[in-house]
């Protein structure tokens, strides 16, 4: 007779609620008339709100035989994932209706991917982590290809899937190797076992392979190559969602894995992650310099931001962990916002994905343009926006905790930020200085507007009064002490 | 005794592996893959993983390879590779780096090797695996079901006839 | 005491303001008021000064600026020297204002002219009355600006505008040296108050004194058009003639002389500097006189004569006889202003023709003018009893005395030669202009209006009688007035008293010889200098050309080179190159993004290889 | 008894073969099969390690990998079919609209 | 008080946002009113400021980001006071000066200007390094937009260059600020970016050197010190009149202000060591800027390079590290603000009429525009540091200060005094004198009443500072002494090393 272990369902309530919402949406969609899809949005949002509330109030703890942990990091990851999932739901409907892609499954996939990201934050076991990663990834592959019949969307889905599966295999081999040397996949046991081994080639290889799997999701150089193509090909709402949700999942997992679990072995991974972050900052920003497409620009920008956040991972001090959390929040807000603005535009019946399409936007939609300007300024890391606070936190942590290497990372970071100013401000400049672009129409959907407004407010709020966010992030950093 | 079984299966697996990536026709690849899968199932038996071996045969050989074959037939003759190699250096580079990687991987994997433990008779039985799945691995097990659900949704999303004026955006 | 001074100051300022709106008469009135006030002050001081002429009355106005241990009080000094200068400035200035009323009568922009002129008067008075070297410097620079504005008054003429600019720039060069001198004095003495400097200067180390004196003298050469900074003055003749008379003959150019007199104790205790002063003065005197021989522009002749006479004054300074210098300054102000006004009258009559080769035979139609000019010539040539004789003779005497005491007879020799040349070229100029055949352009020469003639007459009178101020026969009132104040008494350094009578005879003889030679040369229609020398003189010793070739042209070329190849090419080029390199790298990074999934996968594999390989081998 | 290194070596070789397949083949179907090959090599490693430690965890892991592999095949094949419908090709190099 | 001052313009900008775009007159007046209100507050500050104290006054503290140790701290001392005064004065003038020339996107323009004013005031008044940096960078955005949106043909290039160049330098300062903060964690046992707290650290000279280098680079680009100046001519040339005015009059002062504020306070040893280098670069800048000005064909470029020269004087004064040098530098900052701001307004007047900035397109303008000629003359002479005008006070004190440190510095600097006349008079003559050269002479109408009012205010300031500079000097003296006292402490120990 099999006796189920003691487990606490309230602990996993947020994820359960989101999965449940996804199921409800799936079912309701079957019976729902096409023109009443608004119900799906409402249901999704309600579910997400409930989950968020549960995530905020549910107690900390470990359950499911040590597979699942709820602590400050998990909570941060869950709230972030819920936030970006809500945004992912909100930005979609108008666009999907325009493109004739309006299907209930879209929301199901968004919700499931969101839940996957939440679980990555709470995984306390490598297999758990792997499954969560797949729960996050597979819906994203499909979302990228949602614009059926559009070769670009198909190509995006195909490339994302192919490379994702390739990277997953590496990740899995890493899990296998670590299991081989330590006999366990549970993170705390793993940490003690690896520490006991000292320098062990298989363990090192296993950890390296884990970096690759997560780095792929986070679009870290040299595993970033999929990102520009996929973002460009994916429908705008999907690109918006995947650019943030995958990052949230990957980074909470990286935080969980490296500073939190393997903090004692920092000597082994710090230099490597530091170099990777430097390369990522440089390549991302330089490649973005000459882009002409808005989506590709944001794609390379997201790569660059991966580099900045990686700095925090590589440093791995409590302050750095807190800085990464702050950065993730800011990144999520500003990138979602920047995509949301683009979703509101349409050129010649298609996506407005060229930078020129934003020409003269300020004259036609001043508030939209202002919000975009805020996003661009924040992405560039300039005060008084959240982007500055985020970068400040990361670089301060690097200088404080990273020794000469940290100083070098901070220097590379600030200098590449200067480069990024060039391409971000070009967008803002075109909006304000250019003639109104022909063929570009503005679809003022209240939902998209709400997302733009909210994200802009968040970006400005964190820029001007960041204390609340940094205090919360510091709790996460406090896990290290 | 075990060697006698292992050596041929390993040889078959390797041959199958080469076959998968070298065959001209996808059908041949699929058959080679089947060969690998079957060989591995035998290996699993040698490693006291009866249940997994069974799963291997049922799921992989029975479902996945069949799915491949099904799609190959669906796409029929035109499913070959294009005539022109667009990445002339790719092949050579792939071999070189893969060889290097093999070295790394071998070093890592062999470094992780240890003497086999002594095991109880019921090790690797369906009951033991199932028990583990429903106790320790309950949550991952549920997650696996979610993943399967996603697969179903994917099939419905991607399998459905595209909408009339689909494909906003360029192209 | 304070009231007339304040009134004086405000006269200058308010006059400038009002004259913009009203006509030129107001300007004259304000200057007259200045003169009267100065006279009043003189009379007020005189009784007090009878017993102690060395007294200096300081009138503090306000604390101008302060920073750290630097405190600059804006204050004025009333003493013999400043009063003499103020009287000359305001007196001659007044006459020239009046003259201008006639001369500039049909100029459309008259208020501007008088505004500048009044501003100049204010600045000049500020200069001479300043109680603080920095305040003096303000006046010093201000007169330069006014000079610039007035030379370039007819700004539509490129030559005038350029001349004004040149004057300003050359002055600025001297001023920069002046400023450095100020700094040196301040760092040593912690003050810029003139009286304190006078008291403190003798206690400074010798080297500092010399350096400070030389720096200040460099400033003086700029303002007083001494070698090598004389080049602006001849060009300054592009300005209206009354301006030339006032600024470039009578007042501003004497500022350098005044400065040395003002800081006599500094200079007189710095023998090396004094030596330089004397030599430069003598050389300048000689140089300018020779150049004047070959000029055909009447005003330019006068300009070079001014330079030459200023040279004399510096000779006097160099000869430890500042009083003599001031004396010559005063007389020169009279007769040079007279000469300029007469020249202006000629121009007025001849519709601005100034080339002496196109003039001639004007003595008859312009009787008064010719008379005035003749008096001026005699005065400058040093013929007794005209004013120039007394002052120039005094200088020659002192120079000789210097030679006796130090063995340096160069200043005396040059001064003597110059006296001869001066008489020669002035006679030539007078003959060319007024005698001989009526010139081609002499269409209908007409005598000037009374507003021009009256000042000329007054100046002529002063040129005749001004010498009495310092003449021994009249008891040397000026010398007596000044001597107690200006530190070292004139001639004190001279151990051996020169044979005064002999020297007087020599100088008279030289002057007469010059005049005779001039007449002879003119009669003989021969050029006073020959061949290569003529060209040399005509090109003004090639000094202007040298400046153009050595400083201006290379400077301009340097500027262009810096602005073009260096700034845009190298410095900015480097900046832009950074951008280009980054963009190129960016494009290269883009090219890596080929679009082929298999290649991306290869990238993943290679990345994995590096990371895992590194980690295992670490 | 066949010792663990033999299995592990086989696993490593198969993994590399799969990776080579992904890199050198252009037929998307075969590429997916190569990916399956890689996953199977991982499974072999898991099973070997499970035997090595005498713990069942490795075998459970194989179960999960199997599930994921199955779903990946479904998704991947659906994508291929979809692309084939519009482009009439399964050559991965022909899928190169997005670049730069 | 100070917070009110800083955020008053921003509040104005926010209110302005509510006005409809079409009501141009209302927008203009509202913008002017906001800047005038700021001026009033600044004037009141000027009035109640206690000149006898060298300490920070009206200090306000608040926590901002406690986890990172960032605080909100503002305060004013004699040095920032005069610069705040300058800012408050120049902005209304700049707004008035571009009253008619900006018609497109007027609302955005006015809002940018007001936002810029807030950022600049914030920079001058911040006492927390991060707060300072935030304002410092925040300046860039509206300024780049002013250049990029309302500039002339090449505006995009100029705006980007301005932005990237100055930012590239200042991010290194950010790293240095962080490093300082990190050092303070050990040294003071607290997380702080507070200037007063950090000033109590005693850093080893080598550390000071590195940190100062990073700070100095940021400031040097902003000043700009040769050879980091090339963004300036482009930015100036392409910016609209108001932009050029603000850029020249105030923005460049941020750099020199930075040197004064942070050099002696945080890095006294490094500053002492670097002073000769700074002086050398300053002198090169003085001469180089003047010479290059002389070779320009574009009026705005000419004025821009003259800024390089003038700011060289300021830096020379600062490098002298004595009271006269500092005071002179401070006064010269104000002067340059007034005079060069006025020069840009003058070029703006010409440009508005004929749409050309080329010197060759002008000549004999004085005859057509006598009042303008008078204004130009005064401003030019002020720029050339004629005694009696403001420029002289500054240059005199600077050169005197420099002389007391090294006679050679002053001698070379005096060369700049000469050259400034060369290029200014040259330009003036080319434009104003000579025969009339203009394609449309009828467009050369004399100054309007509004323009005259602006220039009258400027001329009053020129003479006010020139004749009674103590209005400013007295207020900053105590502060300058206090700041310099920071240099004395290490100087006492460094006597054996330093030749001076």
Image (cartoon, helix red, strand yellow):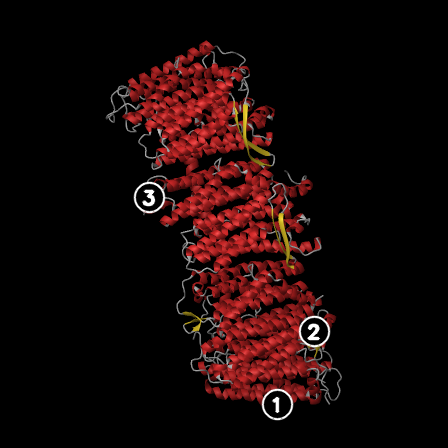
Provide residue C512's location: percent of width, then percent of height. 37, 14
Q: Which numbered mark, 2 or 1, is in the foreground of this view? A: 2
Q: Which residue is mark 3?
A: E437
As drawn, the label of residue A207 is: none
Q: Which residue is mark 2?
A: A60
Mark 2 Cα within 10 Å, few/some/many (few <14, many 20+)? Answer: some
Q: Which is more toward the observer, C430 or C609? A: C430
Q: Which is more toward the observer, C386 or D58? A: C386
Contact (Cβ within 8 Å) of mark 2 with mark 3 = no
Tell me the quadrant of the picture where the C terminus of chain E can be found: top right
Task: Give the answer, above or below, for where B151 lies relative to C149.
Answer: below
Q: CA distance from mark 2 to mark 3?
A: 83 Å
Q: Which residue is mark 1?
A: B58
Tell me the element at label 3. loop
Q: Residue at x 61, y 62 (%)?
A: A466
Q: CA distance from mark 3 to mark 1?
A: 96 Å
Q: Which numbered mark, 3 or 1, is in the foreground of this view? A: 3
Tell me the element at label 2. loop
User: Residue B169's image quarter?
Assistant: bottom left
Q: Which numbered mark, 2 or 3, is in the foreground of this view? A: 2
The answer to whether marks 2 and 1 sit on the same chain is: no
């Amino acid at each position: 007779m099999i006796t189920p272990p003691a487990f606490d369902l309230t602990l996993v309530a947020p994820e359960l609620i989101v999965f449940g919402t996804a199921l409800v949406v799936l079912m309701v969609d079957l019976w729902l008339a096409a023109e009443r899809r608004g119900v799906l949005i409402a249901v999704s949002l309600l579910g997400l709100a409930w989950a968020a509330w549960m995530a905020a109030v549910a107690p900390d703890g470990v359950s499911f035989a040590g597979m699942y942990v709820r602590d400050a990091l998990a909570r941060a990851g869950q709230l972030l994932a819920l936030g970006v999932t809500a945004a992912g739901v909100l930005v979609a409907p108008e666009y999907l209706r325009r493109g004739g892609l309006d299907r209930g499954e879209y929301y199901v996939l968004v919700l499931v991917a969101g839940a996957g990201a939440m679980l990555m934050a709470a995984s306390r076991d490598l297999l758990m982590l792997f499954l969560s990663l797949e729960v996050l990834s597979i819906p994203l592959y499909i979302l990228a290809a949602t614009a059926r019949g559009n070769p670009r969307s198909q190509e995006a889905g195909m490339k994302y899937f192919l490379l994702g599966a390739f990277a997953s295999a590496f990740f899995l081999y890493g899990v296998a190797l670590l299991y081989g040397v330590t006999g366990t996949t549970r993170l705390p046991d793993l940490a003690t076992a690896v520490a006991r081994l000292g320098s062990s080639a298989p363990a090192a290889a296993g950890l390296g392979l884990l970096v690759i799997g997560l780095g792929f999701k986070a679009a870290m150089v040299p595993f970033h190559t999929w990102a520009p193509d996929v973002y460009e090909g994916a429908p705008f709402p999907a690109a918006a969602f995947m650019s943030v949700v995958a990052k949230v999942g990957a980074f909470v997992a990286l935080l969980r894995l490296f500073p939190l679990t393997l903090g004692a072995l920092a000597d082994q991974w710090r230099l490597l992650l530091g170099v990777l972050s430097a390369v990522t900052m440089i390549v991302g920003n330089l490649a973005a310099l000459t882009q002409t497409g808005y989506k590709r620009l944001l794609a390379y920008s997201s790569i660059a931001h991966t580099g900045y956040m990686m700095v925090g991972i590589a440093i791995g001090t409590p302050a750095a962990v807190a800085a990464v959390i702050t950065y993730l929040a800011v990144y999520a807000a500003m990138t979602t916002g920047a995509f949301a603005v683009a979703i509101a535009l349409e050129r010649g019946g298609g996506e407005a994905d060229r930078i020129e399409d934003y020409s003269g936007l300020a004259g036609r939609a001043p508030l939209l343009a202002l919000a975009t300007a805020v996003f661009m300024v924040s992405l560039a890391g300039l005060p008084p926006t959240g982007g500055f606070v985020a970068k400040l936190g990361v670089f301060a942590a690097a200088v404080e905790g990273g020794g000469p290497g940290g100083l070098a990372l901070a220097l590379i970071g600030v200098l590449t930020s200067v480069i990024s100013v060039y391409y971000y401000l070009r967008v803002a400049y075109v909006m304000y200085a250019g003639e109104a672009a022909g063929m570009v129409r503005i679809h003022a959907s209240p939902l998209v507007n709400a997302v733009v407004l909210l994200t802009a407010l968040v970006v400005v709020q964190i820029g001007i009064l960041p204390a609340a966010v940094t205090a919360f992030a510091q709790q996460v950093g406090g896990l290290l002490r | 005794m075990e060697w006698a079984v292992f050596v041929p299966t390993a040889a078959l697996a390797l041959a199958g592996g080469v076959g998968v990536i070298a065959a001209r026709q996808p059908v041949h690849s699929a058959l080679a893959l089947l060969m690998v899968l079957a060989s591995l199932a035998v290996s699993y038996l040698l490693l006291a993983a009866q249940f997994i071996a069974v799963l291997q045969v049922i799921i992989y050989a029975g479902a996945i390879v069949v799915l491949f074959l099904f799609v190959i037939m669906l796409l029929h003759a035109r499913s070959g590779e294009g005539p022109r190699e667009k990445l002339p250096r790719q092949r050579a580079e792939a071999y070189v780096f893969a060889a290097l990687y093999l070295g790394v991987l071998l070093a890592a994997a062999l470094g992780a090797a240890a003497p086999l433990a002594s095991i109880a008779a019921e090790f690797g039985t369906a009951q033991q695996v199932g028990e583990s799945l429903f106790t320790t691995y309950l949550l991952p097990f549920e997650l696996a079901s979610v993943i399967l659900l996603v697969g179903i949704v994917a099939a419905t999303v991607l399998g459905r006839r595209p909408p009339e004026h689909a494909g906003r955006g360029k192209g | 005491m304070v009231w007339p001074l304040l009134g004086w100051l405000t006269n200058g300022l308010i006059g400038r303001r009002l004259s913009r709106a009203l006509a030129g008469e107001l300007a004259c009135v304000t200057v007259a008021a200045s003169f009267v006030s100065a006279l009043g002050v003189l009379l007020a001081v005189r009784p007090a000064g009878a017993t102690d002429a060395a007294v200096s009355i300081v009138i503090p106005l306000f604390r101008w600026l302060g920073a750290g241990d630097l405190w600059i009080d804006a204050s004025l000094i009333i003493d013999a020297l400043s009063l003499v200068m103020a009287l000359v400035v305001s007196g001659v200035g007044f006459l020239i204002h009046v003259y201008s009323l006639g001369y500039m009568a049909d100029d459309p922009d008259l208020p501007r002219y008088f505004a500048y002129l009044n501003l100049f008067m204010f600045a000049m008075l500020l200069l001479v009355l300043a109680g603080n070297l920095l305040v003096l410097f303000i006046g010093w620079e201000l007169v330069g600006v006014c000079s610039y504005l007035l030379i370039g008054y007819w700004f539509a003429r490129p030559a005038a505008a350029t001349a004004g600019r040149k004057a300003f720039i050359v002055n600025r060069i001297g001023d920069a040296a002046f400023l450095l001198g100020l700094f040196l004095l301040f760092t040593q003495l912690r003050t810029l108050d003139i009286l304190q400097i006078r008291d403190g200067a003798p206690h400074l180390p010798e080297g500092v004194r010399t350096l400070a004196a030389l720096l200040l003298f460099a400033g003086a050469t700029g303002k007083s058009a001494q070698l090598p900074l004389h080049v602006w003055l001849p060009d300054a003749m592009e300005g209206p003639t009354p301006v030339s008379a006032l600024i470039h003959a009578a007042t501003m150019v004497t500022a350098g002389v005044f400065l040395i007199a003002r800081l006599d104790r500094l200079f007189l205790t710095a023998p090396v500097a004094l030596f330089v002063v004397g030599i430069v003065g003598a050389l300048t005197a000689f140089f300018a006189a020779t150049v004047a021989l070959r000029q055909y522009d009447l005003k330019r002749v006068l300009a070079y004569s001014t330079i030459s006479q200023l040279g004399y004054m510096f000779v006097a300074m160099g000869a430890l006889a500042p009083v003599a210098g001031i004396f010559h300054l005063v007389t020169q102000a009279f007769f040079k202003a007279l000469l300029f006004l007469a020249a202006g009258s000629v121009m007025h009559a001849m519709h601005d023709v100034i080339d002496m080769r196109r003039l001639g035979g004007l003595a008859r139609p312009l009787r008064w003018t010719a008379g005035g000019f003749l008096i001026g010539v005699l005065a400058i040539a040093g013929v007794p009893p005209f004013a120039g004789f007394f002052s120039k003779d005094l200088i020659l005497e002192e120079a000789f005395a210097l030679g006796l005491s130090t063995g340096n007879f160069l200043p005396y020799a040059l001064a003597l030669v110059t006296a001869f040349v001066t008489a020669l070229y002035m006679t030539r100029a007078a003959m060319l202009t007024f005698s001989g055949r009526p010139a081609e352009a002499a269409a209908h020469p007409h005598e000037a209006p009374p507003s021009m003639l009256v000042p000329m007459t007054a100046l002529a009178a002063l040129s005749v009688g001004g010498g009495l101020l310092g003449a021994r026969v009249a008891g040397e009132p000026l010398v007596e007035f000044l001597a107690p104040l200006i530190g070292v008494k004139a001639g004190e350094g001279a151990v051996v008293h020169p044979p005064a009578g002999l020297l007087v005879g020599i100088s008279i003889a030289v002057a007469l010889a010059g005049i005779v030679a001039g007449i002879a040369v003119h009669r003989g229609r021969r050029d006073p200098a020959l061949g290569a020398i003529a060209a040399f003189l005509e090109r003004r010793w090639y000094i202007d050309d040298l400046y153009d070739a050595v400083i201006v042209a290379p400077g301009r070329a340097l500027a262009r080179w810096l602005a073009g190849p260096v700034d845009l090419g190298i410095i900015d080029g480097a900046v832009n190159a950074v951008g280009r390199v980054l963009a190129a790298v960016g494009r290269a990074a883009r090219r890596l993004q080929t679009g082929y999934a298999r290649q991306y996968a290869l990238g993943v594999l290679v990345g994995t290889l590096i990371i895992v390989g590194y980690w295992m081998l670490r | 008894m066949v010792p663990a290194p033999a299995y592990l070596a086989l696993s490593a070789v198969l993994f590399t073969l799969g990776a080579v397949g992904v890199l050198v083949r252009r037929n998307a179907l075969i590429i997916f099969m190569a990916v399956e090959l890689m996953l199977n090599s991982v499974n072999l490693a898991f099973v070997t390690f499970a035997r090595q430690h005498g713990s069942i965890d490795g075998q459970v892991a194989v179960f999960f990998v199997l599930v994921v592999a199955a779903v990946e095949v479904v998704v991947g094949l659906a994508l291929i079919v979809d692309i084939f419908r519009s482009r009439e090709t399964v050559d991965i190099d022909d899928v190169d609209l997005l670049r730069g | 008080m100070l917070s009110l001052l800083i955020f008053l313009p921003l509040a104005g900008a926010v209110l302005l946002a509510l006005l409809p775009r079409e009501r141009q007159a209302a927008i203009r007046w509202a913008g002017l009113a906001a800047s005038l209100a700021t001026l009033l507050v600044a004037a009141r500050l000027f009035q109640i400021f206690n000149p006898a104290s060298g300490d920070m006054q009206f200090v306000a503290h608040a926590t901002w980001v406690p986890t990172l140790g960032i605080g909100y701290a503002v305060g004013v001392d004699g040095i920032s006071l005069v610069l705040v005064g300058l800012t408050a004065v120049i902005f209304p003038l700049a707004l008035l000066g571009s009253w008619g020339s900006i018609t497109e996107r007027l609302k955005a323009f006015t809002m940018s200007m007001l936002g810029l004013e807030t950022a600049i005031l914030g920079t001058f008044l911040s006492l927390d390094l991060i707060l300072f940096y935030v304002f410092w960078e925040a300046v860039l955005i509206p300024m780049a937009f002013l250049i990029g949106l309302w500039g002339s043909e090449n505006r995009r290039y100029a705006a980007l260059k301005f932005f990237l160049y100055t930012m590239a330098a200042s991010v290194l300062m950010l790293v240095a600020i962080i490093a300082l903060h990190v050092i303070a964690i050990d040294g003071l046992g607290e997380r702080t970016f507070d200037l007063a707290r950090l000033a109590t650290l005693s850093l080893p000279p080598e550390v000071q050197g590195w940190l100062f280098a990073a700070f100095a680079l940021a400031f040097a680009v902003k000043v700009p010190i040769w050879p980091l100046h090339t963004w300036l001519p482009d930015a100036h040339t392409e910016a609209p009149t108001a932009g050029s005015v603000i850029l020249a009059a105030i923005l460049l002062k941020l750099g020199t202000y930075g040197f004064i504020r942070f050099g002696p306070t945080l890095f006294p040893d490094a500053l002492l060591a670097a002073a000769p280098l700074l002086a050398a670069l300053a002198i090169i800048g003085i001469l180089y800027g003047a010479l290059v000005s002389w070779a320009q064909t574009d009026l705005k470029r000419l004025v821009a390079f003259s800024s390089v020269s003038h700011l060289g004087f300021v830096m020379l004064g600062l490098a002298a590290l004595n009271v006269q040098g500092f005071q002179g530098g401070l006064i010269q900052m104000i002067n340059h603000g007034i005079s060069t701001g006025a020069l840009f307004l003058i070029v703006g007047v010409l440009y508005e009429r004929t749409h050309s900035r080329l010197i060759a397109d002008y000549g004999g303008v004085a005859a057509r525009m006598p009042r303008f000629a008078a204004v130009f003359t005064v401003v030019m002479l002020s720029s050339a540091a004629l005694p009696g005008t403001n420029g002289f006070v500054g240059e005199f004190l600077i050169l005197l200060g420099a002389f007391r440190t090294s006679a050679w510095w002053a001698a070379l600097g005096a060369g700049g005094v000469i050259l400034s006349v060369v290029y200014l008079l040259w330009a003036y003559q080319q434009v104003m004198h000579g025969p009339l050269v203009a394609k449309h002479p009828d467009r050369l109408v004399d100054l309007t009443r509004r323009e005259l009012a602006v220039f009258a205010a400027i001329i009053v300031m020129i003479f006010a500072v020139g004749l009674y500079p103590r209005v400013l000097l007295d207020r900053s003296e105590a502060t300058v002494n206090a700041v310099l006292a920071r240099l004395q402490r290490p100087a006492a120990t460094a006597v054996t090393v330093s030749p001076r």
